[in-house]
């Protein structure tokens, strides 16, 4: 079997089964495990999968830059934005992550809402400017342009002095075993700190993030107060996420 055919078979198995294991595949085709691992390394370098111990998981398409992510799952993000906005209560202190789903949350917040929003995203802070009754606190640091969020020690230090009622966290991967993941080490560290400073953490996840994984772990599914997903999520995926410890809620249609 040619290398290109073997790689295509790996990707098709990964898509069909949601995970790929090196040992049974190598035994099935009579290949060395080193050969299969080399294929996985090359596919991972092309962004087509996420390597894990013993195999691979689907790579999240949500690791593209902000311009690319804006085009993904717009209808889902609208419904998730509505669901996220409904969680924000008057008088609360809320941490709002960066990202396109968070922008939809802002668009669905009542204009007379009185609350405090903390964010490390300049884009989110600007979008909140039109909400005259929301106090906006920004956490400054090095701008990570890929996600348009501030990262680094200064963000974490400032976050350690905060206490919030709710954190609406953005991630690029939501997997029953790999948990909540993202594509940058420093960004993952900031998200972990913000999660620790909030009484409740909720993730609003589009379908492309479910069952996918990125290189850096934020936390496990059990740590969430809720995982809000589109109503179109498959029964098998819902079962897997709940088995992984997530309190899954469906965004209303």
Image (cartoon, rainbow, N blue to C red):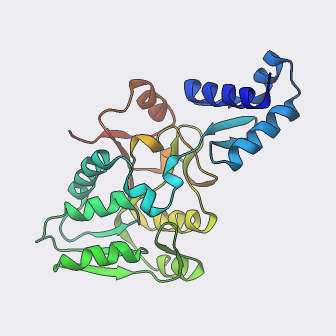
Closer to us: 98 or 34? 34
Judge whether 69 appears above or below 55 on screen. below
Res 116 seen here:
no
Closer to us: 142 or 35? 35
* Quadrant position of residue 228: top left
> Residue 168: image x %, image y %?
37, 60
The residue sitting at 87% across, 35% down in the picture is 34
Res 33 seen here:
yes
> Residue 212: image x %, image y %?
54, 41
Q: Is residue 216 left or right of residue 5?
A: left
* Quadrant position of residue 89: bottom left
Q: Quadrant of the N terminus?
A: top right
Q: Is residue 82 left or right of residue 3?
A: left
The residue sitting at 39% across, 49% down in the picture is 72
The residue sitting at the left extreme is 112
Q: Is residue 26 left or right of residue 119?
A: right
The residue sitting at 26% across, 75% down in the picture is 128
Q: Quadrant of the C terminus?
A: top left
> Residue 121: image x %, image y %?
41, 73
Figure disc tally: 0
Closer to us: 244 or 80? 80
Judge whether 105 appears above or below 178 on screen. below
The residue sitting at 22% across, 40% down in the picture is 252
């Amino acid at each position: 079997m040619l290398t290109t055919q073997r790689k295509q078979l790996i990707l098709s198995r990964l898509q069909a089964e949601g995970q790929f294991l090196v040992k049974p595949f190598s035994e099935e085709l009579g290949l060395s495990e080193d050969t299969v691992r080399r294929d996985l390394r090359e596919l991972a370098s092309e962004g087509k999968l996420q390597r894990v111990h013993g195999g691979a998981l689907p790579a999240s398409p949500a690791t593209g830059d902000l311009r690319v992510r804006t085009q993904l799952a717009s209808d889902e993000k609208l419904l998730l934005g509505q669901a996220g906005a409904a969680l924000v209560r008057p008088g609360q202190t809320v941490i709002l992550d960066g990202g396109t789903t968070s922008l939809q949350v802002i668009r669905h917040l009542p204009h007379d809402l009185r609350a405090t929003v903390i964010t490390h995203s300049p884009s989110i802070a600007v979008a909140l400017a039109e909400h005259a009754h929301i106090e906006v606190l920004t956490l400054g640091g090095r701008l990570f342009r890929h996600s348009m969020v501030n990262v680094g020690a200064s963000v974490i230090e400032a976050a350690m002095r905060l206490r919030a009622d709710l954190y609406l966290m953005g991630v690029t991967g939501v997997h029953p075993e790999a948990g909540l993941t993202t594509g940058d080490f420093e960004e993952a560290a900031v998200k972990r700190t913000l999660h620790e400073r909030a009484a409740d953490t909720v993730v609003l996840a589009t379908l492309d993030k479910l069952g996918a994984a990125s290189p850096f772990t934020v936390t496990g599914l059990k740590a969430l107060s809720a995982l809000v997903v589109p109503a179109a999520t498959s029964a098998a995926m819902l079962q897997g996420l709940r088995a992984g410890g997530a309190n899954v809620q469906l965004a209303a249609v």
